[in-house]
Amino acid sequence: MSIQTYLSKKVSIAIFIALNISIAILASSLVISVKAIPLTITVSPTNGPVGTLTTVTGTNATPFGEIRIYLSMLVLGFFAATTTANSTGGFSASFSIPTLPAGDYFVMALDVTTGDTGLASFIVEPQITLIMIEGSSGEKIDIEGHGFDSSTSLKLAFDGDDVTPTPQPFTGNLGSFKTNFVVPDKPRGTYLVEVNDGSNTVSARFEVIPKITLNPTSGSTATIVMVTGTGFAPSVSMSIEINAINVTMYPSFPTTPDGSFTQFFLVPEIPDGTHVVTATDEIGNSALAPFALPSPSMSLTPNVTSGPCMVTANGVGFPPSTPIALYIEGNSAIDFIDLMTDSQEIYTDEFGSYEFSFIAPLAKPGLYHVIAHSITGGPGFIGEQIASAWLEITEDALLIEINNMIATILIPDLGSIKTDLSGLDAKLIEIEGNIATMNSTIGLIQADLTDLNLNVTSINGNLVTIQTVMGTIEGEIASIEGDTVTIMTDIGAIETDISRLQDGQAGFTIPLYGTLILGAISAIAAVVLLAMHIQVMRKTKKA
């Protein structure tokens, strides 16, 4: 121990003793009786990292008296716990070690009745935590620590190799830090990650696992693919397979002493789709990566709509874990509209697939090109076109009638079809006169109000419940002007003749006048089968 450290601890002890004397003098005004035997305490455990649950046990306290536990830091004694002594003066209390720099600390128990105190010590030890305990070469791993020296620089090492990031990390005033490091090239195995603050060195275990990357990640038959691997056994031979077909070069070069390798293979005659490339070394270590054949493709569901509706784009065979942008092009009604405005970015998964839903914009009937572009060079930079699909927008469909939840719908150029109303996922959006306009999974549908079967099912004071073929509306009578009563609901206002809305009457149809705005009355599920049926009918008619 240096002289400076020794003197610093002596000063801290002297100050702490002075603090205890001050507390004792202050508490003396409350003293009822002074015991001949001083307060004694023990601490278990006596050392550990931040967060350690510590138990203080003591004797010779005032029977049934209050005992307060303090933890000292420099000249301050922080309150940690309180308890009550038993009939013989014994007591026990537990608390967790707070965030503190590394070092020795006093634990003090104070008998509030007599002012007597007891002392013990606890050593705060440094500790580090890896957010991930396994990974591959080149990955960035987050690490945090507590209980180190305060406001000091840190050095990080991985199996003895310096991996300290730039700028160099520092601990805070309370000896804590958060930083990261990049896993160096190492053969598969378990290694020590060390953090050093100049006084303390703490380590944690990290396992390096194999990983391979492909370039390119998609292509056609006979494409040359480069396979790069890390984390395999050192100086061993490798084999490459795709769909269990061995495509290893001959001769095959061994891995390097750090367990990495680079090989090439030709894509054989295999079916279209996403395939798995496997790299395995001679002792059994292996890693996987997806390869798509042929080029990426995209589909739309539904791909025929009569107006604004939810369309889902599904892409396969794209580069894995990369951002994608969707656009729609067409005639002058739509001029290069970004489908992802105010939406989250699209990222393909590890197998190069994605699913993204968007609202098809209102447009004149026609065919529109939906295009997937790569995003390269940073946010906002659109790269080459990767895949595309066609979206057809038709004229509005007309709902002719509803009979026992079976809707008859007239679709321009196709004629009438029948479908279960529960599959339309319809929402009333506007009523003009006696014509209601609904948004559905096949686009806009218009219907006569009499087909919607709006009925009052209950009236309780000013509260009104209205049942429709698409759900229940609850509202409140807001005003009565002449013979017109206005019912306010969460989704809009309904106006009707007061003569048809008598208190306690239920089960009759309400004639509607003016405008009814219904924002979100949904039925059940999507109408995928209906959209497919429409396509079949359209193709049959064209044929």
Image (spheres, rainbow, N blue to C red):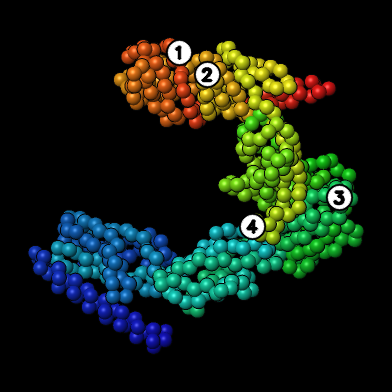
Q: Let me know if residue 125 appears in the view.
A: no
In front of the other: label 3 or label 1? 1
Residue identified by numbered label 3: 267
Disc with the residue nearer the chain's start (3 vs 2) = 3
Q: Amino acid at mark 3?
A: Val
Residue drawn 52% across the image and 62% down it? 129
- Measure the C-alpha gap from mark 3 to mark 4: 33 Å
Instruction: Measure how far apart labels 3 and 1 are at the Cα level.
Output: 68 Å
Q: Is residue 414 above or below residue 267?
A: above
Residue at the bottom extreme, as displayed: 3
Q: Quadrant of residue 479?
A: top left
Residue position marked by numbered label 1 in the rendering: 509
Q: Name which residue type carries label 2.
A: Asn
The mark closer to the camera, 3 or 2, is 2
The x and y percentages for residue 219 are 82, 49
N-term mark: 2 or 4: 4
Which tag is nearer the camera, tag 2 or tag 4? 2
Q: Are marks 2 and 4 in contact (CB under 8 Å)?
A: no
**Looking at the rendered structure, which numbered label has been put on residue 434?**
2
**First in sequence: mark 2 vs mark 1:** 2
Q: Secondary structure at mark 1?
A: strand
On the rendered image, what quadrant is the C terminus found in? top right
State the image coordinates of residue 433 (x, y, percent, origin top left).
Answer: 51, 21
Amino acid type indicated by mark 4: Pro
Dot 3 crowding, Cα within 10 Å, few <14, some 14–19, many 20+ = some
Disc 4 element? loop
Q: Residue at x 34, y 18 (%)?
A: 482
For the residue pair 236 and 265, the one nearer the viewer reads as 265
Q: Above or below — where is 475 with respect to 291?
A: above
Residue 379's tag is: 4
Q: Amino acid at mark 1?
A: Thr
